[in-house]
């Protein structure tokens, strides 16, 4: 890059050379890949919220943002493996699968709560009809599969986010993360659009919804924390990783 | 003369029967018309869709309340069909663009205690809220059309 600048007639700036070295450095690439994965993983969970806030229909956002983000996440993971960013590869893969498994733990309580009448609706099925733009005709097998796939992918996305930041976490970190997701959900436009008020205070006696959401997200967080505590063995959190990488350079 | 009397009394009986039959199968509460269907829910929906096509109209949209509410855990049979005809729609909208509030016409099918009903608001009553002679005339025509359609479907 330095010679290119010289050939191009531009002045040789020590700061540009420094920038070039920094960009090509392993820590910077590592950080860049982490940020890219982080941003891509954050897309999916926010789409349902954005749709319920009235920004755009979920059906169009699924095509414009969800499917590309899924594809790019998979490409980024493959690139991480190919270019030997083993820590990022491991963290992303572990986060993805831990998120999927933890969603099953969440579902035990969410589905149970729904069947006991403690939830106003079946959210994965709602996601499905909104994704396929068929609310009026109601759910069918196709929309149910789409909705459940989206629901589980959200779990995987949260898993990737948590794993990338925390590395080998403590189990209570996972619990805290799960509770934060639950709290965020209960004040989000999704809950508002269900007509039950923030934290579901206008639903039934006012506590059933919040209780189901808290318990199911606590289960998600605990499971995520427990699995990643085992799987991310020896990989520290993002701050320490960056410090280590900087010291290598 | 005797034959004439027999014919007139026969006609009277026939009219009375039609009136009584009609009174039993369809009832009107204000602008709401409810028709009891002899078919089950699914068969009524199918017959209604076919009947709409036979009556030179189309199902423009539908809302399956039953399926939508299944997402809340409620299990019911209820479905609304929005029916109309682009040509008639064009005439109505040309006369009064505000008429979109009641076009296309909504026909609702639901099941209550094992019995299927079809209900709708009489188009003429809904259309009468809007200015325009043509709109009012279309409303009256649609009354006949929807009434004929639902009574055929209910058989």
Image: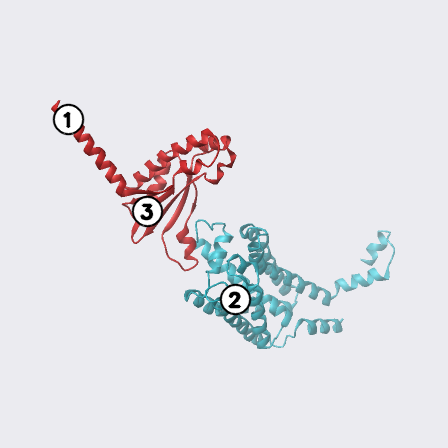
Chain colours: A cyan, B red
Please name the residue that numbered disc 3 is placed on: B117
Asked whether, in this view, residue A10 is left or right of residue A165, the answer is right
Where is residue B75 shown, x and y percent of the image?
37, 57
- How far apart marks 3 and 1 lie (CA) works out to 39 Å
Chain letter of the residue carrying label 1: B
Name, please, the residue furthest toward the top: B1
Query: Which label lies toward us, 3 or 2?
Result: 3
Write down the residue under mark 1: B5
Tag 3's secondary structure? strand
Q: Residue at x 51, y 37 (%)?
A: B98
Chain identifier of the residue bearing label 3 in the image: B
- Outermost residue on the front side: it is B30
The residue drawn where x is 79% and y is 61% is A20
Snapshot quadrant of residue A35: bottom right
The residue that appears at 45% across and 39% down in the rendered structure is B102
Q: Which residue is mark 2?
A: A100
Q: Residue furthest left?
A: B2
| Discs 3/1, front | 1
Q: Are marks 3 and 2 on the same chain?
A: no
Judging from the image, mark 2 belongs to the subunit labelled A
Q: CA distance from mark 2 to mark 1?
A: 84 Å
Determine crowd level at label 1: few under 14, some 14-19, many 20+ residues with C-alpha closer than 10 A. few
Percent position of residue A53, x then y: 58, 55
The percent coordinates of residue B61 (x first, y second) are 44, 43
Q: In 3D space, how far apart are the residues under numbered discs 3 and 2 (Cα atoms)?
A: 46 Å
In the image, A212 versus B5, the foreground residue is: B5
**Could one spot residue B26 in this view of the protein?**
yes
* Earlier sequence position, callout 3 versus callout 1: 1
């Amino acid at each position: 890059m330095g010679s290119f600048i010289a050939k191009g007639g531009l002045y040789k700036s020590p700061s540009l050379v420094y920038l070039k070295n920094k960009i090509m450095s392993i820590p910077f690439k590592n950080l860049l890949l982490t940020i890219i994965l982080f941003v891509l993983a954050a897309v999916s969970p926010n789409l349902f919220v954005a749709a319920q806030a009235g920004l755009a229909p979920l059906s169009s956002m699924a095509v414009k943002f969800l499917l590309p983000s899924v594809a790019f996440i998979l490409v980024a993971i493959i690139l991480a493996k190919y270019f030997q960013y083993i820590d990022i590869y491991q963290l992303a893969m572990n986060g993805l699968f831990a998120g999927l498994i933890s969603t099953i733990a969440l579902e035990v309580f969410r589905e149970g709560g729904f069947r006991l009448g403690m939830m106003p609706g079946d959210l994965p099925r709602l996601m499905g009809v909104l994704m396929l733009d068929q609310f009026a005709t109601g759910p069918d097998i196709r929309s149910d599969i789409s909705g459940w796939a989206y629901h589980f992918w959200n779990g995987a996305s949260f898993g990737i986010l948590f794993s990338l930041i925390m590395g080998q976490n403590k189990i209570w970190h996972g619990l805290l993360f799960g509770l934060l997701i639950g709290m965020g959900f209960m004040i989000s436009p999704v809950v508002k659009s269900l007509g039950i008020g923030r934290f579901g205070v206008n639903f039934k006696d006012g506590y059933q919804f919040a209780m189901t959401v808290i318990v199911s997200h606590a289960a998600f967080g605990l499971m995520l924390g427990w699995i990643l505590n085992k799987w991310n063995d020896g990989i520290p959190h993002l701050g320490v990783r960056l410090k280590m990488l900087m010291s290598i350079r | 003369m005797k034959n004439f009397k027999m014919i007139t009394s026969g006609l009277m009986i026939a009219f009375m029967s039609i009136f009584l039959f009609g009174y039993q199968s369809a009832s009107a509460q204000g602008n709401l018309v409810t028709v009891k269907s002899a078919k089950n829910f699914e068969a009524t929906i199918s017959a209604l869709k076919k009947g709409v096509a036979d009556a030179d109209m189309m199902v423009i949209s539908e809302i399956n309340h039953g399926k939508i509410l299944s997402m809340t855990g409620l299990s019911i049979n209820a479905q609304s069909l929005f029916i109309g005809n682009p040509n008639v729609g064009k005439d109505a909208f040309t006369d009064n663009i505000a008429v979109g509030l009641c076009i296309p016409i909504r026909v609702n099918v639901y099941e209550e205690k094992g019995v299927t009903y079809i209900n709708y608001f009489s188009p003429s009553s809904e259309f009468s809220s809007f200015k325009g002679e043509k709109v009012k005339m279309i409303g009256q025509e649609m009354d006949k059309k929807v009434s004929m359609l639902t009574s055929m479907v209910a058989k």
